[in-house]
Amino acid sequence: MEYWNSTLGSGFILMGILNDSGSPELLCATITVLYMLALTSNGLLLLVITVDSRLHVPMYFLLGQLSLMDLLFTSVFTPKALVDFLQSENTISCGGCALQMFLALTLGGAEDLLLAFMAYDRYVAICHPLNYMVFMRPRVCSLMVATAWILAFLSALGHTLYTMHYPFCKVRKIRHLLCEIPPLLKLACADTSRYELLVYVTGVTFLLMPLSAIVASYALILCTVLHMPSNEGKQKALVTCSSHLTVVGMFYGAATFMYVLPSSLHNPRQDNIISFFYTVVTPALNPLIYSLRNQEVMGALRRVLGKYMLPTHCTF
């Protein structure tokens, strides 16, 4: 078997979902629509949270960070995939592959931790409402967000550097949407079993610890909600929590499939579908899930759009 040195500028060929699809043009149009939806919805949500002072509270500060992560995450992969398909060119340089992997791991890891912090925010708001602004004061919120970004950055940096140090075979086709650890290790011409075990342990730790915190938070929330005397209070709490749980289910379901299930249970087609779901579909749906049933967000959106659209209408 021939080898090639990944440090000499050689590249990979990404054999993504568009190449394996029976109707690539239709799928390309679908991805384009979903990407535009992700840009628009996350961009609007970020704008509303930034501009409207009524949303300058911890819950929406964390939600704004989630929208930012989703916006960046889908932009790591989608534009290149669409351009490659239109130009019939699906190569990626070694440096580009490493950068794509690093950004995807950083943003995915940061979102993983942020979802746990958002669950804690809801726990404090519902179970300890009188102390909410004490437990979730601005300094604490900033520390939560910084922790999510820094831990994800360090983990992603270590995994990217170690993955890319392997010698890769001349057959450099990655049967995947983007550069990720599992498909790249299949191309390595070296024993990767120990590192695969490390990836598995890291994945389980990075996923199950935040997920355990989320489950514990919502178990306590459920106990509190069931003892609420007001039906209106119960309904408001359940609506807010159901939105977050929906997002948690989508994120952790896809991440568990990719990084926790043994490699023997993976196949390229399933991996591509799961990757398509969490890189394109989830970022487009998350802001809709959070905003459509949230009267505060919808009210703020109407105020912001009215404020910026009103001068235009007045000129007629």
Image: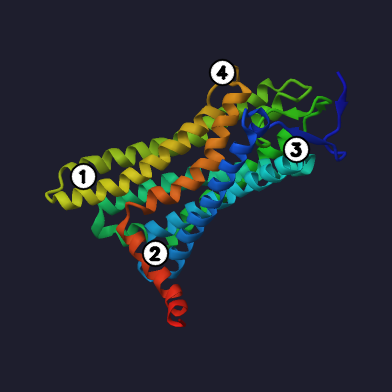
Q: Quadrant of the N terminus?
A: top right
- The residue at which mark 1 appears reads as 224
Q: Kindly state the secondary structure of the residue where label 2 is placed.
A: helix
Q: Kindly state the secondary structure of the residue where label 1 is placed.
A: helix
On residue 301, the disc is 2
Q: Residues within 10 Å of mark 2 (few under 14, many from 20)?
A: many
Regarding residue 312, the answer to whether it shows in the image is yes
Q: Position of residue 128 (x, y in %)?
A: 25, 53
Q: Quadrant of the C terminus?
A: bottom left
Earlier-in-chain disc, 2 versus 3: 3
Tag nearer the camera, 3 or 4: 3
Q: Position of residue 11 (x, y in %)?
A: 81, 37
Regarding residue 197, the answer to whether it shows in the image is no
**From mark 3 to mark 4, how far is it between C-alphas?**
26 Å
Amino acid residing under circle 3: Asn
What residue appears at the point 61 percent right and 49 percent down from the top-left corner?
A: 75
